[in-house]
Amino acid sequence: MRGKIPLVACLVAGVLGVGAGAWPEVRTHAAADTAPSLREDLTALLADQGWERPKPGSWTVEQAADIPRGPVPTIRKITTQDRVVFLTIDDGYEYDPEFVKLVRQHKVPILTFLTSTYVKGQGQYFWSLRNAGSRMENHSVTHPAMNTLPLEQQRKQICDASATITQQYGMRPVFFRPPFGAMNELTQQAAKECGIKLIMLWNTEFYNGTTGPGVGFNGFARGDGGGKGFQPGDIVLMHYRKGLAQQFQMILGWIRQQGFRPAAIENYIPRSLGGNAPDTATTVK
């Protein structure tokens, strides 16, 4: 059938809204051992992930008490009575295809903070996660402690990462997470200049694949003195590490045992700050 484009290619291009030349990483690395199959990717591309939204007035977004207010708001949690927690995963230097399958099969909302240097060579892996419903947000280019850098270098770390993520995944990041949580007033200024609307830190951490202080290997810790278990509106920090699928199953079990569920944090953030909720629903206090 010379001169005709295969139906699958038409569907993929139509869903993505891009031409054949605008998908360099995915095309180059489609045969990588860690990449899911084209059939799985196509299924995910054609699926419309719609996460449950909270009731209006059931939550608020509050400025982190320990961070001075600047041109970009900074949060550590969502204030809500809903028994929900928000799973966020940082970096991207390990690629576990079983994790992608798990996220798809169980339809778990996650949020990825991507260090853009790790996109090189693994574009399709993060496409698979994006198509499973995870937004790709900004975690800098090379993962430095931002508060050790002058303004211009901070700006380059954030703006260049946003440019790479936008080119690869079709949506410009609006959330930024400073590596190590290290930031200062210049970080807020640089983030504003790079189009970031919200700096998202965390108040709990799952030390998946590593040892946390006082909690051991694969331990869970709160950073707010709120005890050992989950609380409504927790933002949980995790990392893309080896064995993530098994570790993810572990934390999902803990969440469910305590009567919580994972939720999409973007549905608890107003549009003016980069989320999906109406601006009239809540404001940053």
Image (cartoon, helix red, strand yellow):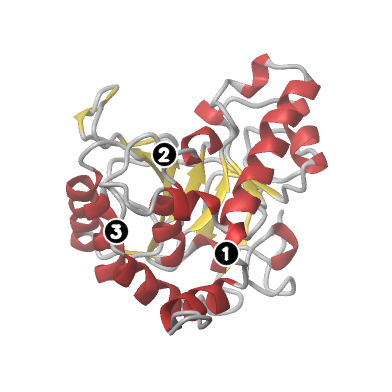
- Image quadrant holding the N terminus, namely bottom left
* Residue at left offset 30%, top offset 69%: 40
Q: Amino acid at mark 1?
A: Ala
Dot 2 falls on a residue whose secondary structure is: loop
Measured in 3D between alpha carbons, the distance from the residue under mark 2 to the one under mark 1, in whole angstroms, is: 26 Å
282 over 137 or under it: above or below: below
Q: Tell us which disc is closer to us: 2 or 1.
A: 1
Q: Which residue is mark 2?
A: 92
Residue toward you, 87 or 92: 92
Which callout, 2 or 1, points at the residue further toward the start of the chain? 1
Residue toward you, 77 or 142: 142
82 over 98 or under it: above or below: below
Measured in 3D between alpha carbons, the distance from the residue under mark 3 to the one under mark 1, in whole angstroms, is: 20 Å
**Quadrant in the rendering for residue 138:** top right
- Contact check, label 2 and label 1, Cβ < 8 Å: no
Can residue 47 be seen at all in this image of the molecule?
no
Q: Which residue is mark 3?
A: 36
Can residue 30 be seen at all in this image of the molecule?
yes
Q: Residue 47's x, y, as percent? A: 42, 79
**Quadrant in the rendering for residue 23:** bottom right
Q: Amino acid at mark 2?
A: Gly
Q: Residue 119's x, y, as percent? A: 49, 41
Dot 1 falls on a residue whose secondary structure is: helix
* Residue at left offset 57%, top offset 49%: 137
* Residue at left offset 75%, top offset 63%: 272
Give the label on residue 123, or none.
none
Decide: few, some or many residues near mark 2? Use Cα within 10 Å; few <14, some 14-19, many ≥20. Answer: many
* Residue at left offset 51%, top offset 42%: 114
Q: Residue 43's x, y, as percent? A: 35, 76
Q: Which residue is mark 1?
A: 20
Q: Amino acid at mark 3?
A: Pro
Decide: few, some or many residues near mark 3? Use Cα within 10 Å; few <14, some 14-19, many ≥20. Answer: some
